[in-house]
Image (cartoon, rainbow, N blue to C red):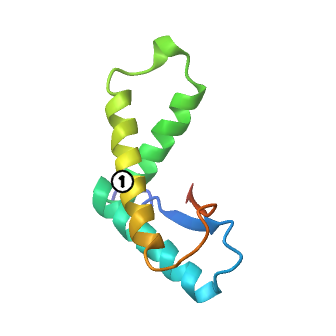
Amino acid sequence: MTDTLPARTFRIELCDTPELTDALRERAEARYARVLERQLGSAEAVCDTLQLLEQLQEAAPEDVPPDAQDVCQRWLKAARAASEAAMQGLGVAESGYFAVHVQ
């Protein structure tokens, strides 16, 4: 019998939107998570990508892998699509943003 690690998960937090009810915030966070997963392929891919991006922030330029720009572009595209889908119809100020937390 082999031990398997539990799948990593993430949670979304919609920040700086005090005008939203908890129910609206939770629905927006769920939409964001769904679109982010769909764009990147899975919850595990979301976690992997976010972890890589965090490592890149700390890396010296010579330690940045050649495909880093592709990973960054893919994340930006996925996050933009997720944000647009999640904020649709909420009518909240543009100051709101989504934080992604790996658990």
Q: Residue at x 33, y 43 (%)?
A: 74
In the image, residue 32 above or below residue 70:
below
Q: Is residue 88 above or below residue 48?
A: below
Bin the neighbour count of mark 1 within 10 Å (Cα to Cα): few under 14, some 14-19, many 20 and up: many
Q: Nearer the viewer, residue 48 or 72?
A: 72
Residue lying at the far top in this picture: please name it: 62
- Name the spot of residue 101 as percent of width and height, x first: 57, 57
**Residue 16: % across, % down:** 69, 66
| Residue 23 in the figure: left or right of residue 72 | right
Q: Which residue is mark 1?
A: 78
Residue drawn 31% across the image and 53% down it: 40
Q: Secondary structure at mark 1?
A: helix
Task: State the residue in front, 102 or 85.
Answer: 85
Q: Position of residue 64 (x, y in %)?
A: 44, 20
Q: Is residue 38 left or right of residue 80?
A: left
Q: Is residue 92 left or right of residue 48?
A: right
